[in-house]
Image: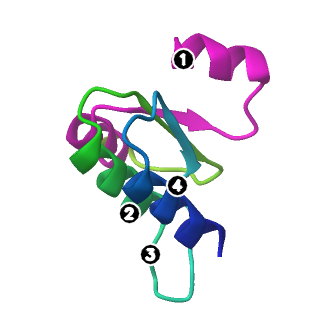
Amino acid sequence: SSLEKALLFIKNESEISILITDLNLNDPQGRTGLYIAQTFREKFHQSPIILLTGAVLSEEDENHLISNLNGKLLSKPCSSEVLLKHAA
């Protein structure tokens, strides 16, 4: 699955400058884009994380995601200009 490929990539790389993933990406094992982000954060403490979602989250849930991962949460659809602005 795409999620498994992403996890293998994170595991095998020594440096990744940014992670951009869909929050609701999932696989048959129940892992999600959030799992990818947490795995990434454990290995790459300083690299930016951008989570994309089409779901409506409560302000509390958004704040929890952002503070625990030290990342950014963007709503889909998201223009490339907005993505680039937050990736910098």
Q: Which element type, helix, strand or loop, lies under badge 4?
A: loop
> Picture coordinates of residue 75 (x, y %)?
62, 37
Above or below for 84 versus 50: above
> Picture coordinates of residue 74 (x, y %)?
56, 33
Residue 78 in the magenta stretch? The answer is: yes
Residue bearing mark 1: 86
Nearer the observer, disc 4 or disc 2? 2
Q: Which element type, helix, strand or loop, lies under badge 3?
A: loop
Q: Do the residues bearing badges 1 and 4 touch, measured as CB atoms within 8 Å?
A: no
Is residue 7 found left or right of 41 in the rendered image? Answer: right
How far apart are the two marked residues, 4 and 2, measured between alpha carbons? 9 Å
How far apart are the two marked residues, 1 and 4, measured between alpha carbons? 16 Å
Residue drawn at x 44%, y 75% as measured from the top left: 31
Residue 27 in the magenta stretch? The answer is: no
Residue drawn at x 38%, y 63% as measured from the top left: 35
Residue drawn at x 32%, y 36% as measured from the top left: 66
Residue bearing mark 3: 31
Residue bearing mark 2: 35
Q: Do the residues bearing badges 3 and 2 touch, measured as CB atoms within 8 Å?
A: yes
How far apart are the two marked residues, 1 and 2, measured between alpha carbons? 21 Å
Our reading of the magenta stretch's main secondary structure is helix
Q: How crowded is mark 3: few (under 14 residues within 10 Å), some or many (20 or more)?
A: some
Q: Do the residues bearing badges 1 and 2 touch, measured as CB atoms within 8 Å?
A: no
The mark nearer the N terminus, 3 or 1, is 3
Most foreground residue, 37 or 59: 37
